[in-house]
Image (tube, rainbow, N blue to C red):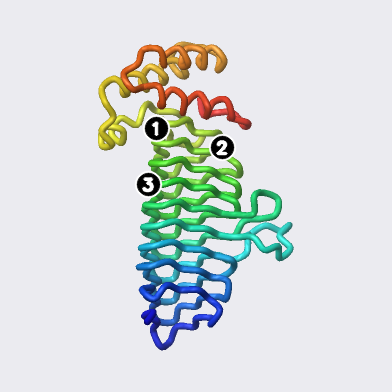
Amino acid sequence: MTQIHATAVVDPRAQLDATVQVGPYAVIGPHVRIGAGTRVGAHCVIEGRTTIGQDNQIFQFASLGAIPQDKKYAGEPTELVIGDRNTIREFCTFNLGTAQDAGVTRVGSDNWIMAYVHIAHDCQLGNQITMANNATLAGHVQVGDWATVGGLVGVLQRMRIGAHAMVGFAGHVNKDVPPFMVVDGNPLAVRGVNLVGLRRRDFSAERLAAIREMHKLLYRQGRTLEEARAGIQALAAQGGGVEADVALMDAFLDSAAYGIAR
């Protein structure tokens, strides 16, 4: 049987796998679905149309699936979808999506999300992301795989943080952060390439060299964005397994509707 503490309030219509654990005084609503091996800590509230995958660890006092903090929200049947093997620490708040977007707030798998993190309506998070304490994402923000968001970082509505990027402590993100870069500050500034993170993920010397060249093209040679993109596209011809990294950067720059941090 599902391990539900006697003081927890779980709506009988909620769909919980038999291996789910629910701690004292937790509250789980009727439209919630939780997969195998997930643990819900004491005093958590999980509501709305929320789907949570397998083997997540949700610490005490988290609030998942509450209605968006958006005055336009009018009770539409929007969703929160969370993948597998995420760690969600104390006092995190993840909201439902809105009808003004795809209607889904989505968090991928294998993410490490520390205390007091806020993920607003319609945010889209990938996999293997680290978010430190008190990081705050406004509505419609996108965060790529393996990104790191430091403590007390604030991210403006509709901004994007690229894959493998790092935002330093207390950064104010009001422009898109390209993949592989390190940024911090207010105003936001690009400090270099996230070499420590990339080396931890076993990027080859050839890939690292190409990414460093992308940084030079974007930030060190006085080029326009169009000129920098042309130079980045040309890097794919050198081979060495850099093609996917070049394509990732080029696609990100091509879709930067609000400008990039430069």
Q: Which of 170 and 194 is in front in this view?
A: 194
Quick check: 175 left or right of 148? right
The reply to whether discs 3 and 1 touch (Cβ–Cβ < 8 Å) is: no
Under mark 1, the amino acid is: Val
For the point 44% across and 31% down, the residue is 179
Residue 116 is tagged as none
- Describe the element under mark 2 as helix, strand or loop: loop
Residue at label 2? 174
The quadrant of the image that shows the N terminus is: bottom left
- Location of residue 242 (image quadrant): top left
Tell us which disc is closer to us: 3 or 2: 3
- Describe the element under mark 1 as helix, strand or loop: strand
Under mark 3, the amino acid is: Gln
Tell me if mark 1 has few (under 14), some (14-19) or many (20+) residues whose alpha carbon lies within 10 angstroms of its own: many
For the point 40% across and 77% down, the residue is 22
Q: Where is residue 255 in the image (x, y as percent from the top left)?
A: 59, 29
For the point 53% across and 43% down, the residue is 142
Q: How far apart are marks 1 and 2 (CA)?
A: 15 Å
Residue at label 3? 128
Q: Where is residue 68 in the image (x, y as percent from the top left)?
A: 63, 60
- Describe the element under mark 3 as helix, strand or loop: loop
Question: Looking at the image, is 260 positioned above or below residue 5?
Answer: above
Q: Where is residue 202 in the image (x, y as percent from the top left)?
A: 25, 33
Residue at label 1? 182
Question: Looking at the image, is 262 positioned above or below residue 127?
Answer: above
- Location of residue 88 (image quadrant): bottom left
